[in-house]
């Protein structure tokens, strides 16, 4: 092999690893803040937690739900598993802190649109 020559397969493998580690769904240790009980902001990206329904900030329990979500976010490394966008343009994602998915029980009783949609069925 010539000095300084890198086989194509080695270069391809290295590029693949770099792209995989930088993939949107694989980002870890994000600095995120709770907007309300079921929405967070990581940098400029707004993320709606999948499967979590919290009261709006103007509804009873809204501020408490946001505080619980923020405490959960502060517990460890945040990772997102992006799953598309909602009708408001927010990223829909499963959000993990310290390897555990944030779930409804982390935030409190269901509230907001999820409850209204279930009652009207």
Image (spheres, grey):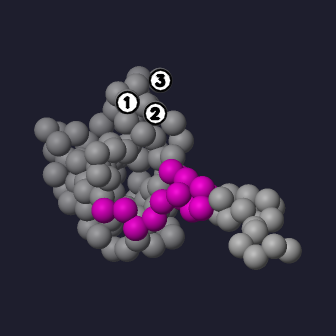
Q: Which mark is residue 85?
A: 2
Q: Residue at x 68, y 58 (%)?
A: 16
The part of the image, by quadrant, that contains residue 91 is top left
Q: How far is the residue under mark 2 from the one under mark 1?
A: 6 Å
Q: Secondary structure at mark 2?
A: strand
Say left or right for 50 vs 76. Answer: right
Quadrant where the N terminus sits is: bottom right
Tell whether label 3 touches label 2 (CB within 8 Å): no
Say left or right for 87 vs 23. Answer: left
In this view, the residue farthest toward the front is: 2
Q: Which mark is residue 89?
A: 1
Q: Residue under circle 3? A: 121
In the rendered image, residue 84, in percent from the top left (x then y), is placed at 51, 36
In this view, the residue farthest toward the right is: 1
Instruction: Please state the total of marks drawn on the protein image.
Output: 3
Seen from the viewer's position, the closer of residues 13 and 33 is 13
Crowding at dot 1, Cα within 10 Å, few <14 / some 14-19 / many 20+, comes out as few
In the rendered image, residue 67, in percent from the top left (x then y), is placed at 21, 60
């Amino acid at each position: 092999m010539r000095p300084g020559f890198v086989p194509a397969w080695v270069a391809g493998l290295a590029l693949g690893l770099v792209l995989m580690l930088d993939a949107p769904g694989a980002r870890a240790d994000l600095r995120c803040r709770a907007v309300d009980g079921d929405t967070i902001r990581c940098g400029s990206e707004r993320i709606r937690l999948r499967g979590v329904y919290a009261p709006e900030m103007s509804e009873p329990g809204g501020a408490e739900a946001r505080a619980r979500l923020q405490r959960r976010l502060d517990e460890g490394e945040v990772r997102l598993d992006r799953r598309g966008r909602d009708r408001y343009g927010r990223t829909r994602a499963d959000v993990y802190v310290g390897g555990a998915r944030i779930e409804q029980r982390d935030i409190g009783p269901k509230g907001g649109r999820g409850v209204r949609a279930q009652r009207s069925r």
